[in-house]
Image (tube, grey):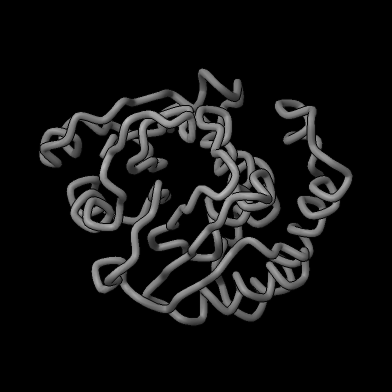
Amino acid sequence: MIDILLKYFDDFTPKQIQQFELLENLYKEWNEKINVVSRKDIDEIYLHHVLHSLSIAAIAEFKPNTNIIDIGCGGGFPGVPLAIFFPEVQFHLVDSIAKKLKVVDAVCEGANITNITTQHIRAEEIKNRKFDFAVSRAVAPLKELWKWAGPLLKKKTMDDGRYTIANGLICLKGGDLHQEIFESNTRPKMLSIYDIFKEEYFKEKFILHVAK
């Protein structure tokens, strides 16, 4: 049930509510064929995956025509929920495993999500494309993520009102991140998701934002 989403967001359109409602059955159906969500998580898809992804929407208001790449998107998190939340933003979901993108494509078709493109590629192999933001969830250490994301991000420009936060990398991570941050040679802003969504599941889960 999407009640957990409505607990924290109250301005969805009827179309968005319908799209979010469709996600559960679409993922359950496809997860039987191609396992992209762990068995224990599939019954908690709205809390563990959709709301977790939307923590990014709680801290960043992406303006229309923003271009975002989801690095190592797996089954489509955080990109799919964010694309429903921001229908006028363009999302490009990439993964090195083609069958995961097959699930993303099927979910987008089933839920009528039209602002997502997918590509079977490693992020570091992408050439001649730039994005406003990169997002990612539990894909790799921050040092690696920044090495992949940095070259794909547009150079910082004077604030033209397009961004509510500085363009850069936004990633979802858990646990003790001090060593990982130290080794990354970046200085991310770190936000506790539990401070945004008061659910036990989000204790020890964080958003890291590295400005370009």
Image location of residue 142, percent across then percent down = 24, 45
Image location of residue 47, percent across then percent down = 65, 40
Image location of residue 163, percent across then percent down = 46, 33
In the rendered view, does 202 fall on the left or right side of 143? right
Quarter the C terminus occupies: top left
Q: Is residue 45 visible in the rendered structure shown here?
A: no
Considering depth in this image, is 108 or 103 the residue closer to the camera?
A: 108
Q: Is residue 71 above or below residue 166?
A: below
Q: Is residue 185 above or below residue 143?
A: above
Q: Is residue 102 above or below residue 130?
A: below
Q: Is residue 50 visible in the rendered structure shown here?
A: yes
Residue drawn where x is 60% and y is 70% of the image: 104
In the rendered view, does 9 fall on the left or right side of 192? right
Considering depth in this image, is 40 or 212 the residue closer to the camera?
A: 212
Considering depth in this image, is 57 or 87 the residue closer to the camera?
A: 87
Residue drawn where x is 42% and y is 78% of the image: 120
Quarter the N terminus occupies: top right
Considering depth in this image, is 105 or 91 the residue closer to the camera?
A: 91
Residue drawn where x is 45% and y is 75% of the image: 119
In the rendered view, does 7 fall on the left or right side of 96? right
Image location of residue 57, percent across then percent down = 57, 35
Q: Which quarter of the figure has residue 19?
A: bottom right
Residue drawn where x is 73% and y is 35% of the image: 5
Q: Residue furthest right?
A: 14
